[in-house]
Amino acid sequence: MEKIKTWLGAFFIIAGIVMMAGSGGDCDGHCGPGNTISEMIMLSFIGLCLFGTGVWIAISAENN
């Protein structure tokens, strides 16, 4: 069970980093306008929550 928790935590960490990195939603102007500020803040906050949850799961799996 600890292996599953560790892998799930690692997935959440990676998903959170990718979500925070892509929160701007622009592609150098080639695909239209990017996200608004409120959308960017919402996506980066969700990514931060995913990252924090992943760290918490991974650390709790290692402590058992």
Image (tube, rainbow, N blue to C red):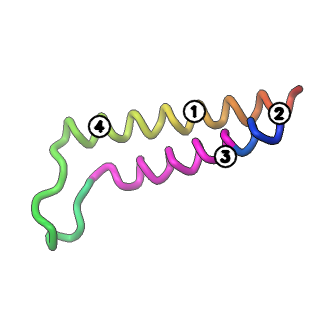
Q: Are marks 4 and 2 in contact (CB under 8 Å)?
A: no
Amino acid carrying mark 3 in the image:
Ala
Vertical comparison of 18 with 47: above or below: below
Mark in the foreground, 2 or 3: 2
Q: Are marks 2 and 3 in contact (CB under 8 Å)?
A: no
Q: Are marks 3 and 4 in contact (CB under 8 Å)?
A: no
Crowdedness of circle 2 by 10 Å Cα count: few (<14), some, many (20+)?
Answer: few
Crowdedness of circle 1 by 10 Å Cα count: few (<14), some, many (20+)?
Answer: some
In the image, which residues are magenta?
A: 8-24
Residue for badge 1:
52
Residue for badge 2:
1
Residue for badge 3:
10
How far separated are the C-alphas under marks 1 and 2? Answer: 20 Å
Q: Are marks 1 and 2 in contact (CB under 8 Å)?
A: no
Residue 58, image x, y percentages:
73, 36
Point 86% across, 28% down: residue: 63
Amino acid carrying mark 1 in the image:
Gly
